[in-house]
Amino acid sequence: MKDLLTIDQLGSDGINEIMIVADSFAEVCQRPIPKVPALRGKTIASMFFEDSTRTRTSFETAAKRLSADVLNFSASSSSVNKGESLRDTVETIEAMGVDAIVVRHGSSGAPEQISRWASASVINGGDGWHAHPTQALLDVYTIREEGRSFEGLRIAIVGDIAHSRVARSNIEAFGLLGAEVTLVAPPTLLPPYVDVLGAKVSNDLDAVLGETDVLYLLRMQHERMDQALVPSLGEYHRAFGLTRERAKRLSSTALIMHPGPMNRGIEISPEVIDDPRVRVLNQVTNGVIVRMAVLYLVIGSASAERAAS
Ligand code: CP
């Protein structure tokens, strides 16, 4: 695994291997000094061409906990604004001597393209509508740490499936592990190829709620919409938002998850955010642990590959 670009390249064995390594880093993160020398001497470039809070900072925290150096590149204050191409930008950063590049880009396929140009490892931190593999891995870790088995687990992914790279990666990861995934959205927020995603589809959240073990809410991605796909945000909330009344009808053992950032009052009512079933901050905590495992495995295997060649 020189690069981590998608979930399907991992398969269930690869996901489970990352979970086991993440368990050992969870223990490291509990220590008074949560740091190990596993990646001392390695440099990780964080290249974000699109906004991020969670992914960027948790990769940076993960790298520092592994004693790696972090080279931060921010597109908004870079020579990209002077017209420098993606390839020239990546090759410039790589020429400074980096072992891995974590990339977020608004264009689907950009990390894969970068992996062809770069000899450093490339980790996809989210590309366009395509994939967000480390989000899916941290979500798997969060469900797994609750002691839930994925075999037959009923997971409803609710909201803007059409524009969601998180939905695509999570459908793959949950499906590979044996979960029963249902996509819940109005028809305008489902992609045209929804039939090939391997999940059930419903347009009625109320019909699905009582048969849900994990309710996974997605953000309405206004920035990726070029037309009004719902009559109004208020109407969306009434039909597909997690309101107090819907939360009451959800099983007492169900988990409520959201990748963030949340639109309070749209996907979820503000009064539900403090519900004890909500795992949003656990997801953030686990993001560091899982990204430590990914950096360790990707950089370790790329070094082994180079040593063997
Ligand atoms: N979940 C997620 O990718 O959040 P950020 O956009 O803040 O990284």
Image (cartoon, grey):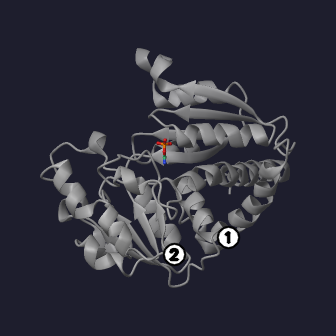
Disc 2 Cβ-to-ligand 1 distance below 8 Å: no
* Place of residue 84 in the rendered image (x, y in percent of width and height, measured from the top left): 46, 21
Element type where label 2 sits in the image: loop
The residue sitting at the top extreme is 82
Q: Tell me which label, 1 or 2, sits earlier in the chain.
A: 1
Q: Count all numbered tags in the image, as a single digit.
A: 2
**267 lies left or right of 153:** left
Q: Nearer the viewer, residue 109 or 71?
A: 71
Is 286 drawn above or below residue 177 in the view shown?
above
Task: Determine the residue positioned at 45% across, 26% down.
Answer: 85
Counting from the top left corner in percent of width and height, residue 239 is at 21, 63
Q: Which quadrant would the N terminus be assigned to in this image? A: bottom right
Could you tell me the amino acid type at mark 1? Asn
Q: Is residue 51 left or right of residue 146?
A: left
Identified at 51% across, 72% down, the residue is 174
Residue 58 % position (x, y): 62, 42
Residue under pointer 2: 253
- Mark sitting on residue 16: 1
Alpha-carbon span between mark 1 and mark 2:
24 Å
Q: Quadrant of residue 66?
A: top right
* Residue 304 x, y percent position in the rendering: 82, 52
Q: Is residue 117 visible?
A: no
> Pointer 1: residues within 10 angstroms few (<14), some, or many (20+)?
some
Query: What type is the residue that disc 2 sits on?
Result: Thr
Quick check: 117 above or below 176? Answer: above
